[in-house]
Image (tube, grey):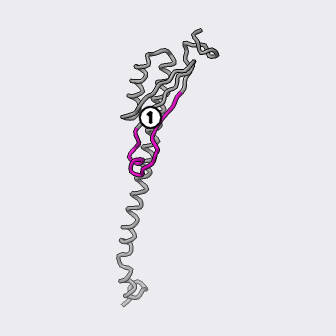
Amino acid sequence: MVLDGRSGSRALAERGMATAEFAVAIPAVLLVLGLCLGAIDLGLDTLRCLGAAGAAARSVARGDPQTAAVAAARRAAPSGATVNVTTTGADVRVVVRSRRGWLSRVLHLAVSPSGTAVALREDVDDASGRPP
């Protein structure tokens, strides 16, 4: 007796096929989801590093104490970030680097979130780099 237009042996052979395909598709979907979440995490940490570097550079350029600017940048940056402030002439350069995210560690990528900002000091002349 054929109920669905197929022979009985063919219907039995295909039974469970959807389950097997679903079992193969689920790990692939989870892998793609994990990669997407890791990329989003990396992007958000990079934005936090950029924001922290910009805030610290503006603060030092205004003449605020460097230690206060570094402390504020560390609070705004991802946990474990390093903050380096370099002042040369009329420029203040701040680099904030964070630890590699979980995706970079798992895939052994040499990618880590970082941000750099440069600001002109307000207490020096633009051309000479000396106080006005």
Q: Residue at x 49, y 14 (%)?
A: 63
Specify the farthest residue to the top. 132
Instruction: Give percent across and percent down for residue 115.
Output: 49, 34
Instruction: Give percent across and percent down for residue 5.
Output: 43, 86
Label count reads 1
Q: Residue at x 43, y 29 (%)?
A: 83
Q: Quadrant of residue 42?
A: top left
Specify the farthest residue to the bottom. 1
Image height check: is 3 above or below 76? below
Q: Residue at x 40, y 20 (%)?
A: 67
- Horizontal side of 128 relative to 71 (left or right) equals right
How many residues crowd mark 1 within 10 Å: few (<14), some (14–19), many (20+)? Answer: many
Q: Quadrant of residue 123?
A: top right
Instruction: Give percent across and percent down for residue 104.
Output: 42, 47
Q: Say which element carries label 1.
A: strand
Instruction: Give percent across and percent down for residue 50.
Output: 48, 32
Q: Residue at x 59, y 8 (%)?
A: 132
Determine if the magenta segment contains residue 107: yes
Image height check: is 34 above or below 8? above
Residue where numbered disc 1 is placed: 97
Amino acid type at circle 1 is Arg
Q: Which residues are magenta?
A: 99-117
Towards the viewer: 79 or 19:
79
For the N terminus, the image quarter is: bottom left
Determine if the magenta segment contains residue 88: no
